[in-house]
Image (cartoon, helix red, strand yellow):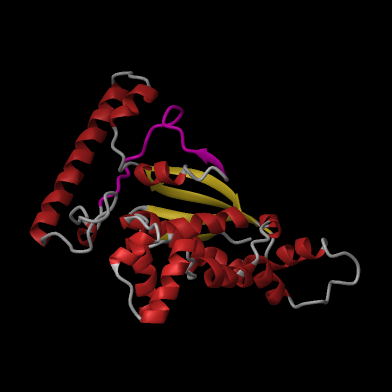
Amino acid sequence: MNEIEIKCLDKGFVRLVDVMGDDTAIVQAARVSYGKGTKSMTEDRSLIRYLMRHKHTSPFEMVEFKFHVKLPIFIARQWIRHRTANVNEYSGRYSEMRDDFYIPELTQIKPQSLFNKQGRAEECLDTDKAMLIAGKMENTQKQLFAEYTDFLDNDVAREIARINLPLSTYTEWYWKIDLHNLFHFLRLRMDSHAQYEFRVYGKAIADIISEIVPLAYEAFEDYTMNSVTFTKAEFEALKIYLRNNTINQDELLALGLSKGEINEYQEKINKLNME
């Protein structure tokens, strides 16, 4: 298999190094449950879509991907929270860290969002201000790496010398995961609420696997990634909205929705209206 690599951010990448299975493997795993005589009962696409639609997840676990990823440490710390994969990371205790640091594009240096406590706003900072900040980031990175190499030159242990390096330092790892858990990963990390830098890696992985399991990825997009689900209270609100073509805040609160849930419900309605 030829390795597939997609560049990410300024110095990172996602590289597919190995894969086990494809759409056929999903179908084979599903049909073994039906027994003799059922192999031709439905075409592959229909079966895969049925499995995805009804959340029969185990056949998707028959497909596995192994990636080599180069990424900033602050993204790695979010990424590792997905505990359904096998990971082996570059060791700063065993090897010297490289002079590789992430500096955001000027258009991504934005103010704090007033509505999302863990994210940036939509608008950009003034270009001159963004350039000043990017320059300070680069200068600090150079200074800290110079100190790191000085520590090493003075016989400080690698595991101690590295501890002042910033979260913008690039690390690398091999990451292996089955398709079911990878779809869950992509649903979260390609979402518009996810951090921009993480979305870049999510998109790269999606571009790679969509070529290998096109039927499964199509079903994922239709039934998971681009779908809208409603809670019981939201469903009641939707019925009122469809009946009256409007619903006010008091009615939503009366249904038991919190202010945060109301905002999320409104996002869903806006999405439906836009489409």
> Is the N terminus in the top left, top right, bottom left or bottom right quadrant?
bottom right
Pick whichever, 273 or 68, lies toward us.
273
- Magenta stretch: includes residue 99: yes
> Is the C terminus in the top left, top right, bottom left or bottom right quadrant?
bottom left
The residue positioned 76% from the left and 63% from the top of the image is 30
On the rendered structure, is 181 left or right of 266?
Answer: right
Asked whether residue 94 appears in the rendered view, the answer is yes
View extreme (top): residue: 155
89 vs 242: above or below: above
Residue 179 x, y percent position in the rendering: 61, 57
Asked whether residue 275 appears in the rendered view, the answer is no
The residue positioned 27% from the left and 54% from the top of the image is 116
Residue 245 x, y percent position in the rendering: 35, 81
* Mark count: 0
Over which residues does the magenta segment extend? Answer: 85-103
- Magenta stretch: includes residue 33: no
Residue 208 x, y percent position in the rendering: 53, 64
Pick whichever, 210 or 161, lies toward us.
210
Q: In the rendered image, which quarter is residue 215 located in? A: bottom right
The residue positioned 23% from the left and 63% from the top of the image is 122
Q: Main secondary structure of the magenta part?
A: loop
Residue 264 x, y percent position in the rendering: 36, 62
68 vs 23: above or below: above
